[in-house]
Image (cartoon, rainbow, N blue to C red):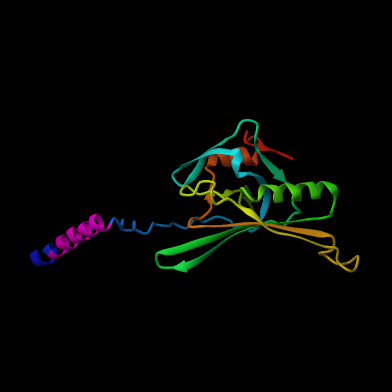
């Protein structure tokens, strides 16, 4: 038994030496996950967007967004996409110590109009410097997309799709519909809002949002 303990101690010491000499930090332990016995609803109900430069700072506490500070006079704006067309996806790529995520927010609008053109043009104008989005899902959770603690707003979303189709027949379900998608890539997953901010977003009282 003493010999075994000695080997364990030696292994720990050697690991610390390797970490110190190489500058490589050993990975943290895999977290415990306890399944919540609760209803799960797919889809999303609301989207809010803003230019990344409008966000002064984001405070993350215990892996949740606890505060959002905007540049004076700037806010997120609500985007009323067609119901049941908003999709938020995170797609992981890579392996071992090189994992990245493609973040994407998709939404559809009907019908084409001057007002919708103005919105589309504003996305195209904001795309070079980045866009941030808040998505409220079917479970009442709210997610910040286009921000992470390492890159902050430097890997914000950009306009990846802006397509229009008239359709051929009056009965075409996708006729006169515009499909918009925002996308980016980072090494981190989307961050949810804490209960306090989530309640303010859902309750239309968040001071950093202009509601429709």
Q: Residue at x 51, y 46 (%)?
A: 152
What's the magenta region?
Answer: 7-22
Asked whether residue 9 is drawn in magenta, I would say yes
125 or 99, which is in the foreground? 125
Query: Where residue 8 sits: x, y (%)?
Result: 17, 63
Query: Where residue 161 sits: x, y (%)?
Result: 70, 60
Query: Where residue 204 sits: x, y (%)?
Result: 67, 37
Instruction: Report the side of 148 relative to 203 (left or right).
Output: left
Query: Where residue 182 sits: x, y (%)?
Result: 65, 55
Q: Main SS of the magenta segment? A: helix
Q: Is residue 168 above or below residue 47?
A: below
Instruction: Report the side of 78 relative to 62 (left or right).
Output: right
183 or 64, which is in the foreground? 183
Q: Is residue 98 above or below residue 149?
A: below
75 or 44, which is in the foreground? 75
Instruction: Report the side of 191 relative to 134 (left or right).
Output: left
The N terminus - image quarter: bottom left
The C terminus - image quarter: top right
Instruction: Report the side of 14 relative to 166 (left or right).
Output: left
Tally the numbered discs. 0
Residue at the extreme right:
170
In the rendered image, which quarter is residue 107 located in? bottom right
Q: Residue at x 86, y 63 (%)?
A: 166
Asked whether residue 101 is drawn in magenta, I would say no
Residue at the extreme top:
72
């Amino acid at each position: 038994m003493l010999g075994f303990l000695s080997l364990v101690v030696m292994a720990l010491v050697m690991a610390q030496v390797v970490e110190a000499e190489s500058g490589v930090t050993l990975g943290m332990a895999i977290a415990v996950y306890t399944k919540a016995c609760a209803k799960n609803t797919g889809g999303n109900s609301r989207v809010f967007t803003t230019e990344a430069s409008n966000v002064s700072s984001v405070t993350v506490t215990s892996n949740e967004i606890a505060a959002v500070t905007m540049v004076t006079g700037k806010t997120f704006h609500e985007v009323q996409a067609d119901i049941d067309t908003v999709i938020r996806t995170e797609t992981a790529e890579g392996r071992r110590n090189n994992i990245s995520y493609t973040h994407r927010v998709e939404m559809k609008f009907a019908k084409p109009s001057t007002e919708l053109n103005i919105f589309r043009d504003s996305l195209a104008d904001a795309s070079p410097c980045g866009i941030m989005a808040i998505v409220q899902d079917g479970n009442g959770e709210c997610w910040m997309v286009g921000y992470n603690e390492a890159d902050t707003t430097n890997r914000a979303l950009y306009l990846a799709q802006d397509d229009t189709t008239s359709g051929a027949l009056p009965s075409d379900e996708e006729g006169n519909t515009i499909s918009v998608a925002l996308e980016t890539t980072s090494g981190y997953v989307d961050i949810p809002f804490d209960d306090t901010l989530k309640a303010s977003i859902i309750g239309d009282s968040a001071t950093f949002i202009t509601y429709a």
